[in-house]
Image (spheres, rainbow, N blue to C red):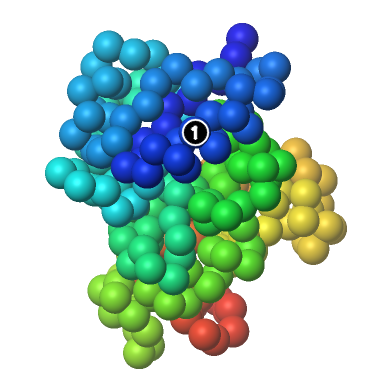
Amino acid sequence: MSIRVMLVDDQVLLRTGFRMVLAAQPDMEVVAEAGDGVEALQVLRSTEVDVVLMDVRMPKLDGVEATRRICERDGAPKVIILTTFDLDEYAFSALKAGAGGFMLKDVPPGELLAAIRAVHSGDAVVAPSTTRRLLDRFAPMLPGGGAGGGRARPELDRLTDREREVVLLVAQGLSNGEIAARLVLSEATVKTHVGRILTKLELRDRVQVVVMAYETGLVRAGGPTGPAR
């Protein structure tokens, strides 16, 4: 069964380019398009969609608020934020709103396709290089972020030492395979740890783990990663 994709961007040429790339894939189809967040919400009421590629800056309703409203729904499609990074100061807010990840608009086609497949399968797109740069830039906007200290989260006390190690590595954008190699564990064991972490911390996915790690001070913008006791 094909992955049903919706394109949401106010630039028609960009939507056309993405549509051409996706149309060439045997396991994907573009089933809907919208030029702003309001139109996207309207279309989603009558169209079954698996993954939404969402622009951030759009008229009427921006991608952040549109993502928040989409993710509040039961059985909501996954959302991948498309950002120019240097200009879009709302991408981090979109991740907090429930997006499954973000990609730069000039991403190579292969990486975009891999991201769509990953998010559709239930994973989250957390690229180490771009994620760290984005969070380092916007972490000072978080409660208690940037200047040291973080928002207390009692749930962290529920984590075992090993789970805390895994959280720190997830926050760096490492995949399950990379974490397994780093900690000398099987990939299946790492997947189990990640599942327990999400349950204990009541988080949706790996992206939310990254957000939580910065909010609580487990990792700090521009600084080394280390455990917070």
Give above or below for 156 relative to 214: above
73, 44: nearer the viewer: 44
Which amino acid type is shown beneath numbered disc 1?
Thr
Q: Is residue 11 visible?
A: yes
Q: Which residue is mark 1?
A: 16
Give above or below for 186 relative to 29: below
Crowding near the residue tagged with mark 1, few <14, some 14–19, many ≥20 C-alpha atoms within 10 Å: few
- Asked where in the image residue 43 lies, by quadrant, the reply is top left
Give the residue drawn at x 34%, y 51%: 56
As drawn, is 30 to the left or to the right of 46?
Answer: right
Q: Residue furthest left?
A: 60
Q: Is residue 192 visible?
A: no
Instruction: Name the spot of residue 88 as percent of width and height, x first.
Output: 36, 64
As drawn, is 213 to the left or to the right of 183?
Answer: left
Q: Secondary structure at mark 1?
A: helix
Give the residue drawn at x 46%, y 61%: 84
- Asked where in the image residue 93 lies, by quadrant, the reply is bottom left
Instruction: Name the spot of residue 28 as percent of width and height, x first.
Output: 60, 21
Give the residue drawn at x 55%, y 44%: 124
Give above or below for 179 relative to 101: below
12, 102: nearer the viewer: 12
Give the residue drawn at x 54%, y 36%: 18
Instruction: Name the spot of residue 38 as percent of width and height, x first.
Output: 19, 34
Instruction: Name the spot of residue 216 as percent of width and height, x first.
Output: 38, 71
